[in-house]
Image (spheres, grey):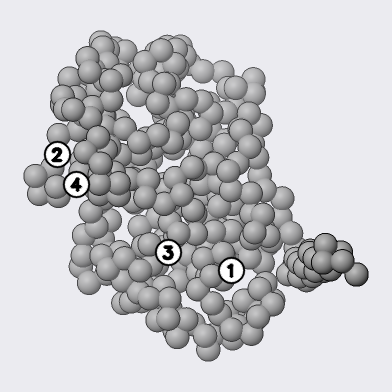
């Protein structure tokens, strides 16, 4: 037998073993189909290495609402990511973490994450699982270690049975916690706003909503394109630095001066109910956000070229855009029982 033939057998055997292992991992699980709404592009995260199942999703939901993932047992993921606020923080500037800490930034909303190319306000993470791990370990967020989390839940019979059934292993691993949370958060989709129904032809805009929509497409859609209402880019939009927080954005990740004051462009879906706004929650209302672009843009070397002259809008036009943005609210999503705290 030649070396080439031997190598071929080894490769084929490895492939077959991998295929069998993959089949074994999903046996007896109720697999879920990833939701891709009409008009949406193909998602980036497709659960290829983390087979999506009802059991995995439900385990992730249980973990998401479990305070034991934090060091003080009082700050689950859901304490900063509330369904009523599109899984952002409800009417608050920056989130509260463990031991009376105050986080540096406003908690970003958690929906349509499977389409994200990078995560967190500074785009530090390109992996959903890595993005999930950070707040669990972050000392001003949840402040816990995976060893600490596992020690607290390893004797929980329900967790034991769930993890064993889904991952086919007798012990809980950090990787399994992250995979389950990725299944829950990655499966959260919002695509049933009045805007979506308008695009399907099942509901009409008011005259003011339509005026706002036309203005939005002319003035805002470069950075917030349909249907995701973000281009996932990192930009400096001319916000003055907060002298207390001293948060210079992406430069903390890259160390490059040209990334100073750059933050991720957020989605505008559900923005009407996800206040406060901007990376540090400095604005309470959508009109304040729009007025920033009209007259508050601060010049700097890294300012996005599109905003050098701000965005010219009359008071009426600013109000019209605000009304259109309300039409991006997905009311059903905010009450969807699939995403609520398990009883």
User: Along the polypeptide, which appears first: circle 3 or circle 2?
Assistant: 3
Q: Which residue is at the far left?
A: 243
Q: How far is mark 3 from mark 1, CA to CA?
A: 16 Å
Residues at badges 1 and 4 in contact (C-beta under 8 Å)?
A: no
**Quarter of the figure that contains the C terminus:** bottom right
Mark 3 — residue? 133
Q: Is residue 31 above or below residue 112?
A: below
User: Along the polypeptide, which appears first: circle 3 or circle 1?
Assistant: 1
Helix, strand, or loop for circle 2? Answer: loop
Residue 78: x, y in percent?
41, 61
Helix, strand, or loop for circle 4? Answer: loop
Mark 2 — residue? 241
Mark 4 — residue? 247
Tell me the tag on residue 59. 1
Please tell me how crowded label 2 is: few (under 14), some (14-19), or many (20+) other residues with Cα within 10 Å. Answer: few
User: Along the polypeptide, which appears first: circle 2 or circle 1?
Assistant: 1
Please tell me how crowded label 1 is: few (under 14), some (14-19), or many (20+) other residues with Cα within 10 Å. Answer: many
Q: Indicate the quadrant where residue 56 lies.
A: bottom right
Residues at badges 3 and 1 in contact (C-beta under 8 Å)?
A: no
User: Along the polypeptide, which appears first: circle 2 or circle 4?
Assistant: 2
- Left or right, 171 with reference to 254: right
Residues at badges 4 and 3 in contact (C-beta under 8 Å)?
A: no
Tell me the tag on residue 242. none
Q: How far is mark 1 from mark 4, CA to CA?
A: 35 Å
Residues at badges 2 and 4 in contact (C-beta under 8 Å)?
A: yes
Q: How far is mark 2 from mark 1, CA to CA?
A: 40 Å
Residue 300: x, y in percent?
16, 27
Helix, strand, or loop for circle 1? Answer: helix
Q: Indicate the quadrant where residue 3 lies.
A: bottom right
Q: How far is mark 2 from mark 4, CA to CA?
A: 7 Å
Please tell me how crowded label 3 is: few (under 14), some (14-19), or many (20+) other residues with Cα within 10 Å. Answer: some
Looking at the image, which residue is at 40% across and 26% down?
Answer: 223
């Amino acid at each position: 037998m030649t070396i080439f033939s031997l190598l071929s057998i080894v490769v084929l055997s490895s492939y077959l073993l991998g295929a069998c292992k993959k089949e074994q991992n999903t046996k007896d699980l109720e697999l879920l189909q990833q939701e891709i709404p009409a008009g949406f592009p193909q998602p980036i995260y497709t659960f290829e290495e983390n087979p999506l199942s009802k059991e995995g999703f439900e385990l992730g939901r249980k973990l998401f609402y479990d305070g034991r993932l934090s060091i003080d047992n009082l700050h689950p993921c859901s304490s900063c990511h509330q369904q009523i606020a599109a899984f952002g923080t409800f009417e608050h500037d920056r989130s509260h973490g463990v031991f009376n800490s105050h986080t540096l930034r406003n908690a970003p909303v958690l929906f349509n994450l499977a389409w994200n190319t990078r995560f967190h306000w500074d785009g530090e993470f390109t992996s959903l699982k890595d993005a999930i791990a950070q707040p669990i370990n972050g000392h001003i967020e949840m402040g816990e270690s995976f060893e600490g989390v596992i020690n607290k839940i390893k004797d929980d019979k329900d967790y034991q049975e769930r993890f064993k059934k889904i991952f086919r292993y007798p012990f809980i691993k950090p990787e399994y916690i992250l995979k389950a949370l990725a299944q829950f958060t990655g499966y959260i989709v919002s695509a049933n706003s009045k805007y979506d129904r308008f695009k399907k032809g099942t509901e009409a805009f008011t005259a003011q909503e339509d005026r706002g929509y036309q203005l939005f497409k002319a003035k805002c859609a470069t950075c917030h394109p349909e249907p995701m209402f973000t281009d996932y880019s990192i930009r400096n939009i001319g916000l003055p630095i907060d002298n207390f927080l001293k948060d210079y954005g992406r430069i903390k990740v890259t160390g490059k001066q040209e990334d100073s004051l750059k933050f991720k462009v957020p989605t505008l879906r559900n923005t009407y109910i996800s206040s406060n706004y901007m990376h540090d929650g400095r604005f309470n209302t959508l009109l304040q956000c729009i007025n920033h672009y009209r007259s508050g843009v601060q010049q700097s070397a890294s300012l996005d070229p599109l905003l050098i002259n701000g965005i010219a809008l009359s008071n009426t036009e600013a109000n019209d855009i605000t009304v259109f943005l309300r039409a991006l609210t997905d009311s059903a999503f905010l009450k969807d029982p699939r995403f609520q705290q398990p009883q």
